[in-house]
Amino acid sequence: MHGRLQHAQCLLARGADPTRLEVNSGRTALHKAAFWGHEHIVPWLIAVCKVSVDAIDYNGDTALHDAARFGHDGCVAALLGAGSSVVLRNKEDKTPFDVAVENGKTPDERLKVELAYPVKQ
């Protein structure tokens, strides 16, 4: 929650598994980093810890849904750069872009185009 990369690295060294799903929510460490806007931790979780960018929690949300919901453009950019799907829909049938708009968050123009108009997916 506090976003200290050094703390996360220590936890990993002690055997913590950032890919493990939280029992009550199905969320990974990547979901939580995206939720809190820790854009400096998101790439580390993806590249070093190999957390799936499209892991789905019990609500059907991916980390991209969380980052978009709260307007964390740096996290959105990192997730898109790592190949996170923009077309996955949560249990409310909403894409990450839908969630952003619903919560009054407007991604910066570059990200808005990628979220709203997926080219490859």
Image: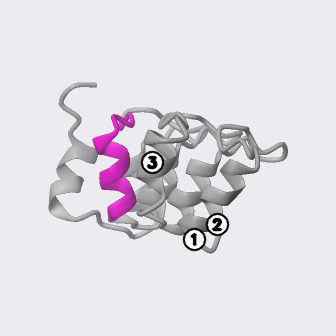
Can you give x and y, in whole percent of width and height, for residue 70 in the image? 47, 67
Which residue appears farthest toward the bottom when viewing the image? 2
Residue type at the position of mark 3: Leu
Q: What element carries label 2?
A: helix
From which residue to which does the magenta span run? 74-86
Q: Which residue is drawn at 40% across and 70% down?
A: 104
Label 3: how many residues lie within 10 Å, few (<14), some (14-19) or many (20+)? many
Which residue appears farthest toward the right when viewing the image? 23
Q: Earlier in the sequence, mark 1 or mark 3?
A: 1
| Label 1, label 3: how far apart the Cα atoms are | 20 Å
Q: In the rendered structure, find residue 64 and report the number of the disc placed on it.
A: 3
Label 2: how many residues lie within 10 Å, few (<14), some (14-19) or many (20+)? few
Q: In the rendered structure, find residue 82 and report the number of the disc placed on it.
A: none
Q: Say whether residue 9 is left or right of residue 68.
A: right
Can you give x and y, in whole percent of width and height, for residue 4 in the image? 57, 71
Q: Of tags 3 and 2, which is closer to the observer?
A: 2
Q: Residue at x 54, y 65 (%)?
A: 5
Q: Residue at x 28, y 25 (%)?
A: 121
Q: Is mark 1 on a helix, strand or loop?
A: loop
Q: Is mark 3 on a helix, strand or loop?
A: helix
Residue type at the position of mark 2: His
Q: Are discs 2 and 1 less than 8 Å apart at CB?
A: yes
| Label 2, label 1: how far apart the Cα atoms are | 5 Å
Q: Say which of 89 and 20 sits in front.
A: 20
Q: In the rendered structure, find residue 7 and report the number of the disc placed on it.
A: 2
Position of 73 relative to 58 (above/below): below
Which residue, given by chain and number where applicable, does mark 1 sit on? 4
Can you give x and y, in whole percent of width and height, for residue 28 in the image? 65, 45
Q: In which quarter of the image is the N terminus?
A: bottom right
